[in-house]
Image (tube, grey):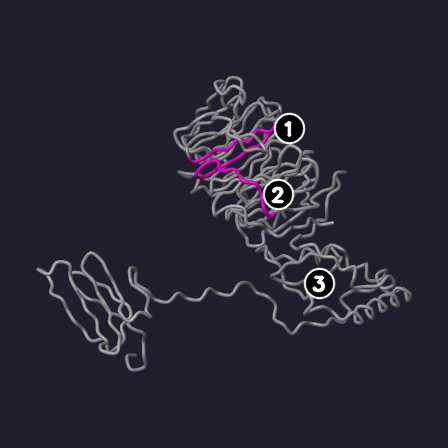
Amino acid sequence: MPATRKPMRYGHTEGHTEVCFDDSGSFIVTCGSDGDVRIWEDLDDDDPKFINVGEKAYSCALKNGKLVTAVSNNTIQVHTFPEGVPDGILTRFTTNANHVVFNGDGTKIAAGSSDFLVKIVDVMDSSQQKTFRGHDAPVLSLSFDPKDIFLASASCDGSVRVWQISDQTCAISWPLLQKSNDVINAKSICRLAWQPKSGKLLAIPVEKSVKLYRRESWSHQFDLSDNFISQTLNIVTWSPCGQYLAAGSINGLIIVWNVETKDCMERVKHEKGYAICGLAWHPTCGRISYTDAEGNLGLLENVCDPSGKTSSSKVSSRVEKDYNDLFDGDDMSNAGDFLNDNAVEIPSFSKGIINDDEDDEDLMMASGRPRQRSHILEDDENSVDISMLKTGSSLLKEEEEDGQEGSIHNLPLVTSQRPFYDGPMPTPRQKPFQSGSTPLHLTHRFMVWNSIGIIRCYNDEQDNAIDVEFHDTSIHHATHLSNTLNYTIADLSHEAILLACESTDELA
């Protein structure tokens, strides 16, 4: 069955947000630009525990009960998990660190900073450090080889490097990325990843595809791509079994491939199209947790089951709903061919339930937006008459008995008179205003107050006028003006007094 996208939750304030699971998969851990690390028991957790680690948290990693964070005071800190007790500082940089990761057994961490340096630090003895120099711009991301022989890094200088950990030398460097002068200006944060267990392949998100390189020979093996990818990929992550690879783009698309067959298994679109900046695969089951650049947390379920079977290749964009109660036992046997227990709901459009592969592919246009089709299942206001469904079921049964091919397209549909939801309404235009002015409803109000002077407006029973006073009376003297045109906005300089009012037919 297709992956199920749960509604997203607010996690942190707007900005880069990261996510990971603990070793058992019991907790989801996120960090964000508000400086908090939040510990979620599940996506439905209404009161997640939080640990304040600094003014901003740029990255976090969790292993063996140790929570490591890269924070805005240019340090890599350690806290106990889940207690959140501070446990020291592992290392410092001259500017903020952008990414921190654990190695496979949790004994070492690697951190990359905007001062172009990469450091590997022993968690138990922080004096045991190795520094890697060679990048010419801020470091974007890091990934440990599962065998602890190599470390991969991506940088704003446009290069992806593989380092030999033992002697701190660069084994290979590829000029794959677009150059930038800082992380905030980078087109992609290029979260690369080694294949788990064997480390046979290194996956690197480059533009609209994922490039895979073979270990030690460093030869380019193949690319993973999809026609629905319209923007740059930001991040990749492997399933724990190493069979599947998930990637997230800067316009909110999440793609899952079977690496062996190179087939696209899942396509899931972020409900608001925000950039995916965090992806984490559950250590034991088919769950992917993800975060966006607005601080929200999301969850995909049923991406693949424990036996390794993949889910459907349909575009999964709907929330799970149960329609069992709509039908009795007799009718369910017929209607079950086209009504399943996991109908998917997309708020921005409706679609028909079609079983052939060609129509499934037609649900998305080249831009990645779904085509609009009427759906046989809607909410209570738009639901189809049950008798109509029963009639359709009996028609199908009769056609099967006659040996003719039945088609769900022939069923009569009751269409809703309510217009389809085409997106949010435009924000009302803001009314004109002047900085430093007081509200319009006041009878005595300031229209402007700046370094030149003050303009006051009086509108009461005795007078409707405007007074202008200058701070330096040796240059300009005070002025009194009548306000017959009901001026509401003013500005003042050494050369002019500017007044504005609403347009009328007489003025036009």
Q: Quickly name the residue at label 1.
A: 200
Q: Residue furthest bottom?
A: 506
**50 in the magenta segment:** yes
Q: Quickly name the residue at label 2.
A: 289
Instruction: Please tell me whether the stretch drawn in magenta is mainly helix, strand or loop.
Output: strand
Pinpoint residue 234: horizontal percent, then vertical percent: 53, 42
| Amino acid type at mark 2 | Ser
Q: Nearer the viewer, residue 405 or 137?
A: 137
Q: Nearer the viewer, mark 2 or mark 3?
A: 2
Q: Nearer the viewer, residue 309 or 56?
A: 56
The earlier-in-sequence mark between 3 and 1 is: 1
Question: Label for residue 90?
Answer: none
CA separation in Å, label 3 and label 1: 43 Å
Q: Nearer the viewer, mark 3 or mark 1?
A: 3
Q: Quickly name the residue at label 3.
A: 352
Pinpoint residue 483: horizontal percent, then vertical percent: 23, 75
